[in-house]
Image (cartoon, coloured by chain):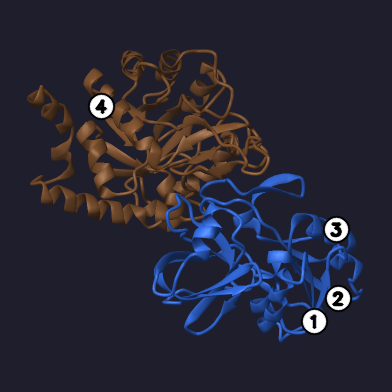
Amino acid sequence: MRREALEVVANEGIGPYHLIRVKRGALHPGDPGQFFMLEAPGRVLPRPMSVCFAHASELAFLIDPIGPGTRALCELRPGDAIHLLGPLGNGWRLDVERPLLVGGGIGVAPLPYLSERLGRPPALLGFRSEWHAEAAALVPNAEVVLEPTYVTEALPGGYDVLACGPEPMLEALRALVPDAQLAWEAPMACGYGACYGCAVEVDGVLERLCVKGPVLAAA
Amino acid sequence: MLLLNASGCLDAMTAPPVARSLDAYVTKTITPLPREGNPPVRIAETEHGMLNAIGLANPGRDRFLVTVLPRLRELGVPIWVSVGGFSAAEYAETCAALEGVTIELNLSCPNVDEAPESAAEIVSACRAATALPLYAKLSPAAWDVAESARAVEAAGADGLSLVNTIRGLALDDRTLAPTLARGTGGYSGPALKPIALAAVYACAHATALPIVGMGGVRSGRDALDLIAAGASAVALGTILFADPDAPARVRSELDAECSARGYAAPSDARAIAHEAHAHAS
């Protein structure tokens, strides 16, 4: 992991979300599903965000402005600088035969980078509304379902599922696809194992999600 | 000037270079039996700080001694072991099992039930159990922290760690229910600094013990304030979550602050606030 102050290149609205692009500096982008801690201007703690795109000179993060930290991030303007720490955690195993990317809502965030690394496999994305579904344009070969239809109802069989989304979606997928690789979320103060804040239950014991995950095997 | 981490704010096993950037590494609190800690949600950011209710998650004394401590010794920095317990005897048993470390007695975790004995009684039991250096970590919530400091000094403490977090509460924006699963948590971060300064100032006046000052330190100037109030060492807590490079930065900022003010070393500024106060009054 490495920490650098990097310049914001662009802030683009996509439906309710913001795609924040920053210069990459000397940071390693890491693997799909890994994340960075982003300094949220004016806040005490940074916020964990998975990489949405990694280009030679830029990193991009898709952010949903749902609280004070994410709102501060979504108010960044080109030319502003923020500190990034990462890459952190463990991403998806990419040695799968028939990948299917499954995303729900803001869980679409790490899928563009994952899709690129896996050669643009099929994707199934679920959103709350047409407005939220504008983010589907970021993921190649994506089929979109809107509420009240859930991704679990449209899920084809015979695929290696790599997913990110809200907890109920991941729990439903876990029950349906025992060998799925699921990217979870938890409040984190540090992202590198120091704070013990992101504890989640893994195989019956509480583990730090930033150390064990955020991508975990379903079973 | 010694720069440490506050207990529970750094895991040397997941970030060895950060631990090595300190003058000593302080472990998360060790209890006799393993503890999984409190259920999530365990942390919450507030406007000027953060709350935590981790609940002393740790592998327990035996596993710590056999599997963790030998690896910590390989870091090449002095190790301070934070010791916790639910009775004076539990604290003392862990102290007796330790060798080659400094001991910090966590007498003030706001997130678990306390031992029935007073801080001084626990220090006294530990003093009888070990000849290792014993630091007593006190709560800033005591009405008269200087009185607690005098009591643990009389009981045989070699130093003070000031301060632990102070109990706080945050409510969820949507439901207005407590954000943390345990309800309350320990409040840390920038808002704690004036509280820590007051405790260090009072205890430096009341005792001759060395003091590790901590609470809301983000910059070299914050560290200098604690030193001026009477701290002989400074520990970084919440800032390490946001900035693992903070030790080197705080150190260089502290040196620059001292140079600018005509101090050859940070230790020359120790307790200077007391002299300045005496002159002013």
Q: Which image quadrant for residue B281?
A: top left
Label 1 close to label 2 by CB (< 8 Å): yes
Q: Give the camera-side residue of B89 and A135.
A: A135
Label 4 close to label 2 by CB (< 8 Å): no
Which amino acid type is marked by label 3?
Ala
Q: Report the chain shown in blue.
A: A
Work out which quarter of the rendered image holds the C terminus of chain A and state it. bottom right
Label 4 neighbourhood size at 10 Å, few (<14), some (14-19), many (20+)? many
- Residue B124 makes an appearance in the image: yes
Where residue B174 appears, x then y in whole percent?
Answer: 66, 44
Label 3 neighbourhood size at 10 Å, few (<14), some (14-19), many (20+)? few
- Residue at the location (31% across, 35% down)? B213
Question: Mark 2 = which residue?
Answer: A159
Which amino acid type is marked by label 1?
Pro
How much space separates mark 1 and mark 2, taking CA atoms? 10 Å
Where residue B48 appears, x then y in whole percent?
Answer: 43, 43
Q: From what the image shows, is residue A22 above or below residue B41?
A: below
